[in-house]
Amino acid sequence: MTGSIEKLEKNYDIRIKWRAFPLHPDTPEQGRTLEDLFKHKKIAFDVNKMMANLRENAEKLGLALGDRKMTYNSRLAQEVGLWAETKGHGHPFHMEAFKAYFVEGKNIAQKDVLLNLIESSGLDREEGKAVIETREFSDAVDSDWELSRTKGVTAVPSFFIGLDRLVGAQSYENLEKLIVKYGAKPI
């Protein structure tokens, strides 16, 4: 991503809590084209135009974004992400998953892809494999999904602090204004 979160954590006495979100949970494991996804939702649009707009906005924020044509089910990756949080490797895992999905176009529903992400984010591959096989963090993802419904989250990323929220990719300056408003102190 942009490094904004890392920079905030480095410069301020804050802790970021990642939450899982039901991003197209009905997507099959093999994925579906973006065109099919939006047709299924009865939304007419031009995929190429949408991706060009997204790339332009991503570039302004310093975000890498590949030429996505597919969407994949992120449920299992979210379970692994919550496990990674318990191991102190949540942020590295989320960044690796972001890059794999949005930049490289990898199917993060596939176990072998997840195992490689586990390893590349500094986690134990075999322990991660057990987490995937047992679905140990399935209930935790369900709880996060319910929380997102309760809070009215409809898009990611969404940043919450106090009564305020920011939706969508944000600049460091916007995030900094928000945390300072709520009393975040520089380190």
Image (cartoon, helix red, strand yellow):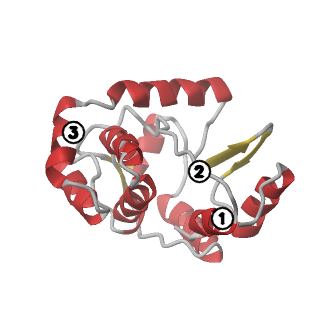
Q: Residue 88, how many percent across, how many down? A: 41, 52
Query: Between residues 29 and 38, which one lies in front from this camera angle?
Result: 29
Whole-number angstrom distance, CA of label 2 to CA of label 3:
24 Å
The residue tagged 3 is 132
Label annotation for residue 16: 2
Residues at marks 2 and 3 touching, judged by CB atoms closer than 8 Å: no
Q: Which residue is mark 1?
A: 8
Q: Amino acid at mark 2?
A: Ile
Q: Helix or strand or loop: what does disc 3 sit on?
A: helix
Instruction: Give the CA separation, mark 1 to mark 3.
Output: 31 Å
Residue in view at x 22 percent, y 38 percent: 131
Q: Residues within 10 Å of mark 3 (few under 14, many from 20)?
A: many
Position of residue 112 measured from the top left corner of the image (x, y, whole percent)? 16, 53
Query: Quick check: marks 2 and 1 in contact, CB under 8 Å?
Result: yes
The residue at the far right in this view is: 181
Task: Assign the C terminus to one quadrant of the image.
Answer: bottom right
Q: Quadrant of residue 99?
A: bottom left
Instruction: Please report whichever mark, 2 or 1, sits nearer to the chain's N-terminal start.
Output: 1
Quarter of the figure with residue 142: top left
Mark in the foreground, 2 or 3: 2
Query: Tag 1's secondary structure?
Result: helix
Q: Could you tell me which residue is drawn at 40 percent across and 33 percent down? A: 25
Amino acid at pointer 3? Ile
**Number of residue marks:** 3
Asked if residue 90 lies left or right of residue 53, the reply is: left
Q: Residues within 10 Å of mark 1 (few under 14, many from 20)?
A: many
Q: Amino acid at mark 1?
A: Leu
Q: Label 2 vs label 1: CA separation?
A: 9 Å
- Residue shown at 62% from the left, 70% from the top: 7
